[in-house]
Image (cartoon, helix red, strand yellow):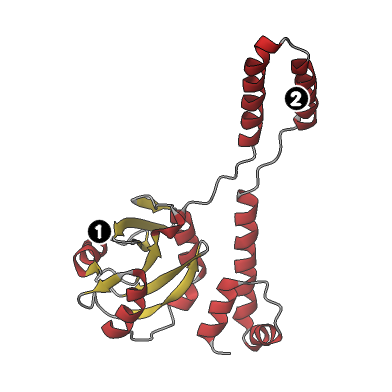
Amino acid sequence: MDELEFRRQAYADPNNQEQDFIDAISQEAPRQSFVDELQQMDDHLAAAMKVAPPEDLANRILLQQNLNQFQRQKKQQRFHLAAAASVAFVIGLSLTFIRQPVSLGDHALAHVAHEAGFADKVDEAVSLQALNTKLASFGGKMEQMPGHIYYANYCDFDGVRSLHMVMDTPDGKMTVFFVPKEQNKSMSPEFGNDKYTGEAFEMGRFQIAVVGGKQQHIDSAVSMLRNTVSSI
């Protein structure tokens, strides 16, 4: 299994137990560390999306049962008011369990951080024709080469099939994601952390996110993509 196929499978499922994937890990020492990092990221994302139930949940449920019993004993003319109060209580309780999803910007930053070592080494010298073949499936087209393209392939972006591109710029390598808007979530125009900075904008049926290092100036790359990429 070559490096590209190994990393594609690792991104898709770092807990993959298929024998060829396990054998591929043992072939290269750094691969185990890479898989461990992906598993840790999955654990962190899972933990971030968990909301602990209120400590007094049992008391709330008992209270609700008592309220329902009491309401049934009320006079008929107060039935609708009691029912409305009960529904409001249940809705309020339910809202405490809604998961707060990781933002798409945070997902982009995590994606770039975990493929940093890979992006530094790969160079597929992607042609404009090859790039547009993939980009067409998202309803987009690049009118001219933005510069040297080291890598362009499909990836899993927060559960959505997207296009992951690494390109050269006057300020160094930058990562670009083309993400369909089918998941009904939008990226913030600007996002970042202590290591990376990112900007995003919409183009037709997809969103484009550009991620670079904290010291890089990505405004020029964003401007270039706005003028070079079009929807079809």
Looking at the image, is mark 1 or mark 2 earlier in the sequence? 2
| Residue 72 spot, x, y in % from top left | 76, 18
Q: Nearer the viewer, residue 67 or 195?
A: 67
- Nearer the observer, disc 1 or disc 2? 2
Q: Residues within 10 Å of mark 1 (few under 14, many from 20)?
A: few
Q: Is residue 201 left or right of residue 181?
A: left
Asked which quadrant contains residue 75, the reply is top right
Helix, strand or loop status at disc 2:
helix
Residue sitting nearer the eye, 160 or 14: 160
Judging by the rendered image, the residue that carries numbered circle 2 is 64
Q: Quadrant of residue 225?
A: bottom left
Q: Position of residue 171 (x, y in %)?
A: 27, 68
Amino acid on which the number 1 mark rests in the picture:
Asp
Q: Which residue is mark 1?
A: 219
Picture layout, residue 2 above or below residue 117? below
Q: Find residue 15 and name its label.
A: none
Quarter-of-image position of residue 174: bottom left
| In the rendered image, the vertical position of residue 86 relative to residue 77, given as above or below | below
Q: Is residue 194 visible?
A: no
In the image, residue 91 sits, relative to residue 71, either above or below, namely below
The quarter of the picture where the C terminus appears is bottom left
Asked whether, in this view, residue 145 is left or right of residue 105, the answer is left
Q: Residue at x 44, y 75 (%)?
A: 154
Residue located 80% across and 26% down the image: 62
> Where's residue 152, x and y in %?
38, 78
Q: Nearer the viewer, residue 17 or 120?
A: 17
How far apart, in angstroms, are the residues tagged by discs 1 and 2?
Answer: 55 Å
On the image, the x and y values in percent for residue 142 come to: 24, 74
| Quarter of the rendering occupied by the N terminus | bottom right
